Image: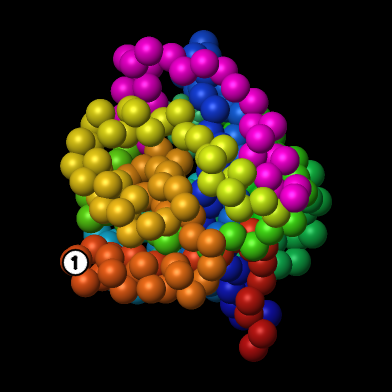
Amino acid sequence: MDSVTVRAPAKINLFLGVGPVRDDGFHPLDTIYQAISLYDDVTVTEADAWSVHVEAIGGVDVSEVPRDEHNIVVHAGLLLTAHHGIDRCARIEVAKAIPVAGGMAGGSADAAATLVALDRLWDLRTTDEDLLALAARLGSDVPFALVGGTARGTGRGEIVDAVTDAGSWWWLVVPNAEGLSTPAVYRAFDDLPQPDSLDPAEVLAALEHGDLITLADALRNDLEPAALALRPDLRTTRTLLEETGVMRVLLSGSGPTLLGLSGTHELALRLRERLLDDGYQAWVAHGPVAGAHEVSYA
Ligand code: C5P
């Protein structure tokens, strides 16, 4: 096989419970991840040296994405080759449709896709357990990008357990031209009064029964006050999105992307038109969808 393409999804957090910072600088999380139908594609080809090539899909701003060994996809390649004790390199092409620094784990999706793509390219047959362990070393939400679907994340987010999700949920995704740094949002979180620790029982029950009204009510993101403190302009977008009539507005991860939960696909498409008329960028996506999977059929 000359090259392999693997597709990995964006993630959102239907529930993001954040505890006080740990000694290692990370925050304990109790989160419900959902993979949604917005994807990056990673294509790997055997080469004499590592190289990274980035293509923007659908108007995503890729100007800040590193094209060198600082890109997480090269970390993924180095970690996988070290794990197997091999000395091989690849050209890595990333077609990015997931907003950069948007709170949707686009970099994590790329890392997960690279692990799977290189494993297939070189027929390494890495066990699922080892892939998940390597993914956790690359970032807190890289394991979820492998697993996909809807899952509960604990630890710093890297311990992932699938949950029952009877629904298919429609989301309006409203990105922002200016990204937010995840560490900066967590630091702002540390400076604010700490939220009560709650568990995601209500979200889990809503997912199990496919209950839209309960889900809309139970969505929660503890990082939202911190992101809004750093980016007060997000309030305007939030209000506008609320006024479209979506069931509920939620910040995606550490932001700045905002999500609107819509009852139907048709309604989401109509509301998207309204946002576009107001000069906003917006997409419609559904979840849950699969984690990183091969899409090279050539
Ligand atoms: O794990 P990842 O590399 O994605 O984390 C990026 C940064 O986000 C960390 O360096 C840390 O500042 C913050 N973070 C955190 N608690 C988590 C996950 C991430 O504080 N559970």
Q: Is residue 204 magenta?
A: yes
Q: Quadrant of residue 275?
A: bottom left
Residue ID at (46%, 18%): 195
| Residue 128 coordinates in the image, percent (x, y) | 78, 50
Label 1: few (<14), some (14–19) or many (≥20) C-alpha neighbours in 10 Å: few
- Asked whether the viewer can see residue 92, the reply is no
x, y (%) of residue 222?
A: 46, 28
The residue nearer to you, when weighing 204 against 227, is: 204
Q: Return the x and y of residue 106 as percentages of the image width and height.
A: 45, 54
**In this figure, what is the number of numbered marks?**
1
State which quarter of the image contains the N terminus.
Answer: bottom right
Residue 282 visible in the shown view: yes
Identify the residue at image location x=45%, y=41%: 253
Magenta segment's dominant SS is helix
Q: Nearer the viewer, residue 108 or 197?
A: 197
Residue at image x 63%, y 80%? 296
Residue 190 falls left or right of residue 64 = right
Q: Provide the secondary structure element on which disc 1 rests.
A: loop
Asked if residue 239 lies left or right of residue 164, the reply is left
Give the residue type at disc 1.
Gly
Give the residue at x 33% y 59%.
244
Q: Which residue is mark 1?
A: 279
> Would residue 63 be counted in the magenta stretch?
no
**Who is closer to the viewer here, 145 or 64?**
145
Residue 84: x and y in percent read 72, 49
Q: Which residues are magenta?
A: 182-209
Q: Is residue 208 above or below residue 265?
A: above
